[in-house]
Amino acid sequence: RLDLLLRAAARVEQADVVIVGEEPTTAPGKPSYRMELEQLARDISLKVHFYGRVPNQALPEILNQASVFVLPSLKEGNPKALMEAMACACPCVGTRVPGITDIIEHEKTGLLVDNEDELVAAISRLFSNPSLSLKLGQQAHLQANEHFDLMKNIEREANLLRQYMRAPEAS
């Protein structure tokens, strides 16, 4: 639902949107989602930067430059982009859908919204309240470090496996 993000961002005075990533391929003859978004951006006079696919190593730099990370999905499974933004201490806003609500704790590690008006309010609130942005970003970083760190998760899994393994019995 990046169209939701663009419509909301057009209503926020300081918004400048950066979109990273590639879309799935579309059916032949159908305009790509990016083309639809580019047209929407022109129609609502919004400045949008489309980066497309970027190397994983470049993501922290992009995220560290962002004032807010927004994930306006209709559904999510395991939103790695959200986890990466949180790891970079970027204040996050997400739609109130499974996957996102499993990761963002409203008002603690980010903000959750249901619609365009709430998204406008959340983005505006973070832009106008640097201390809230900092607090949410720091809490998101702590949560990401505790729960999403690959090495910590590998160690947790190894410890769990060790608990269920038994030493071979002597015969």
Image (tube, rainbow, N blue to C red):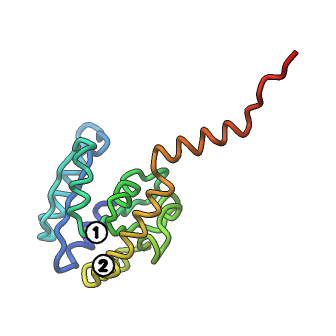
Q: Hey, which quadrant is residue 138 in on the image?
A: bottom left
Q: Which is nearer the eye, 67 or 146?
A: 146
Q: In this view, does 135 lie to the left or right of 14?
A: right
Which quarter of the figure is the C terminus placed in? top right
Disc ID at residue 126:
2
At horizontal 45% and vertical 77% (from top left) the residue drawn is 107
Q: How crowded is mark 2: few (under 14 residues within 10 Å), some or many (20 or more)?
A: many
Q: How far apart are marks 2 and 1 (CA)?
A: 7 Å
Residue position for label 1: 68
- What amino acid is labelled 1 in the image? Val
At horizontal 40% and vertical 60% (from top left) the residue drawn is 73
- What amino acid is labelled 2 in the image? Leu
Q: Are marks 2 and 1 in contact (CB under 8 Å)?
A: yes
The image shows residue 22, relative to residue 169, as above or below, that is below
The image shows residue 121, relative to residue 111, as above or below, that is below
Q: Which is nearer the eye, 23 or 87?
A: 87
Q: Hey, which quadrant is residue 91 in on the image?
A: bottom left
Q: Which residue lies furthest to the front in this view?
A: 170
Q: Where does the image place residue 104, in percent across and percent down from the top left?
A: 47, 66
The image shows residue 125, relative to residue 10, as above or below, that is below
